[in-house]
């Protein structure tokens, strides 16, 4: 009997594996030819493997009473492939659940549900949006990976160049190697070569020119065929309007994003929360900090539902290049001590930054930070006094719903695993992940624990901001 069960499980796995293998080319073709981004309850299927596809379906059990498998979604996907679709973001999981409850033939159901985008293949933009990276460090290279992965048919965002200071005769080869291999995020998903004649890195067919410069206003980008570009300054060297506006003096640059908190009147944008600050008239923006991006969506969700009277935010933040490997001089207090060997109390501007994004919380938050001996993934602890009595179940159920089906579902993720630790969140595509089993609530007080990949999750937020600036907002179906 045990042997029979073993065979049943193996045969079922092989059956689903075979179906998933047949689905991948369809998913890829819809993405390349029609700019259709397919997901299963928010988990992207684009550029995934068979295992990625099966795991995305497994995740859906957090939402549904039962399981959702590729055997359920495959007929819906095949029906979609028969249509002439315009660009869209389509949740195959949600669409399948609706189909199962409809009682309709699959072709008729899918044609009805996707009628609004069954209008023929169209281009998202009149011409691709040029992107320039100013700096090619930790965030710069992750932005490059994401932009390359999202290139699709090449009609959307096009990474054209990275501007750096020349490090030596083998500079191009070394920078290509750093893009190819990453000690935290693993190998680049694709093929990278170098074109020494053009001084460029070729990554999955995308030519990224490496331009050498020491100043923001010293490059004529139009000489490289770059025009109306959005420049992402990930050096953090200039944070005020005067310094960042120097980029705008370089021919070919139209707008600038800083990947750090901006000073003065620069709009600090947390993608998905205050996108209204992105206007055609403004040319200089800040994407705020990784911690601000992690906590603001959760703070907004909690404040909208329960009201926040007062709160304190503490972040256990992984060490960064700003700190020393071993004890040495540092201009900031405590940061001169060895980062891999110490927990280091330091300051964070995230609490004040929250108030800039959510004005209703001005004067209600305090914050501090502890740098900890891990190379990536941080943990924000939100100690909040609310405007009403709450329970753990009430808060968790609410945040779970927000993470699955709300305007903030790309920003907030949710886990109920009793075994997760920081390294499990390396590569998280969300701004922050609520650890529901750590939630504390008593009376009108609660404590929330929010994990965040302070490198990759933040970089995803920056790209979402770039997409908004470029007018790349796909309709999301089913509604």
Image (spheres, rainbow, N blue to C red):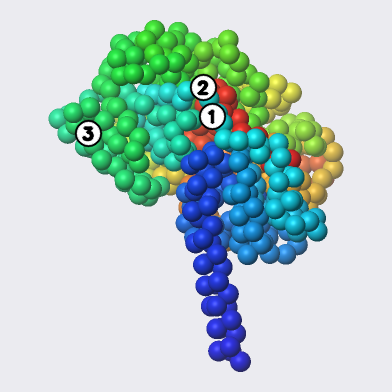
Quadrant housing the C terminus: top right
Give the residue drawn at x 56%, y 59%: 55
Residue 205 position in % (x across, y down): 34, 38
Give the residue drawn at x 26%, y 30%: 200
Residue 463 position in % (x across, y down): 51, 32
Disc 2 + disc 1, Cβ < 8 Å: yes
What distance separates the C-alpha of mark 2 from that of mark 3? 29 Å
Q: Which residue in the structure is indicated by mark 2?
A: 126
Give the residue drawn at x 32%, y 30%: 208
Q: Which residue in the structure is indicated by mark 1?
A: 123
> Is 153 displayed left or right of 187 in the figure?
right
Give the residue drawn at x 41%, y 45%: 375
Residue 256 against residue 178 in the figure, above or below: above
Q: Which residue in the structure is indicated by mark 3?
A: 195
Between discs 2 and 3, the one toward the N terminus? 2
Disc 1 + disc 3, Cβ < 8 Å: no
Quadrant housing the N terminus: bottom right
């Amino acid at each position: 009997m045990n042997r029979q069960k073993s065979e049943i499980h193996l045969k079922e796995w092989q059956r689903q594996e075979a179906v998933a293998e047949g689905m991948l080319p369809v998913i890829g073709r819809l993405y390349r030819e029609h700019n259709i981004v397919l997901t299963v309850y928010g988990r992207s299927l684009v550029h995934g493997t068979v295992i990625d596809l099966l795991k995305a379906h497994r995740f859906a059990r957090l939402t549904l009473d039962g399981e959702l498998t590729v055997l359920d979604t495959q007929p819906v996907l095949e029906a979609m492939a028969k249509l002439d679709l315009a660009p869209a973001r389509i949740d195959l999981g949600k669409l399948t659940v609706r189909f199962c409850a409809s009682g309709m033939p699959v072709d008729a159901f899918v044609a009805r549900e996707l009628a609004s985008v069954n209008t023929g293949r169209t281009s998202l933009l009149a011409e691709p949006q040029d992107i320039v990276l100013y700096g090619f460090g930790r965030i710069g290279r992750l932005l490059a990976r994401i932009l390359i992965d999202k290139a699709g048919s090449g009609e959307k965002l096009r990474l054209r160049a990275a501007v750096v200071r020349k490090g030596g005769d083998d500079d191009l080869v070394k920078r290509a190697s750093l893009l190819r291999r990453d000690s935290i995020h693993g190998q680049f998903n694709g093929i990278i070569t170098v074109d020494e004649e053009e001084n460029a890195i070729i990554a999955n067919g995308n030519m990224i020119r490496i331009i050498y410069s020491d100043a923001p206003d010293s490059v004529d980008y139009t000489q490289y065929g770059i025009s109306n570009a959005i420049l992402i300054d990930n050096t953090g060297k200039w944070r005020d309007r005067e310094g960042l506006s120097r980029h705008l003096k370089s021919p070919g640059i139209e707008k600038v994003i800083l990947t750090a908190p901006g000073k003065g009147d620069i709009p600090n944008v947390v993608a998905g929360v205050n996108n209204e600050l992105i206007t055609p008239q403004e040319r200089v923006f800040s994407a705020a900090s990784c911690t601000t991006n992690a906590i603001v969506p959760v703070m907004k969700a909690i404040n909208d539902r329960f009201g926040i009277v007062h709160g304190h935010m503490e972040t256990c933040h992984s060490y960064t290049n700003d700190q020393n490997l071993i004890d040495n001089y540092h201009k900031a207090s405590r940061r001169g001590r060895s980062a891999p060997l110490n927990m280091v109390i330091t300051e964070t501007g995230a609490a004040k930054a929250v108030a800039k994004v959510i004005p209703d919380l001005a004067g209600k938050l305090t914050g501090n930070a502890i740098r900890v001996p891990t190379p990536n993934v941080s943990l924000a602890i939100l100690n909040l006094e609310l405007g009403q009595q709450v329970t753990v179940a009430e808060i968790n159920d609410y945040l779970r719903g927000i993470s699955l089906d709300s305007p903030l579902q790309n920003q907030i993720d949710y886990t109920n695993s009793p075994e997760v630790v920081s390294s499990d969140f390396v590569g998280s595509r969300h701004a922050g992940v609520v650890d529901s089993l750590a939630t504390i609530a008593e009376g009108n007080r609660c404590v929330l624990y929010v994990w965040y990949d302070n490198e990759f999750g933040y970089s995803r937020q920056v790209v979402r901001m770039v997409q908004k600036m470029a007018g790349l907002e796909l309709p999301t179906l089913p509604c």
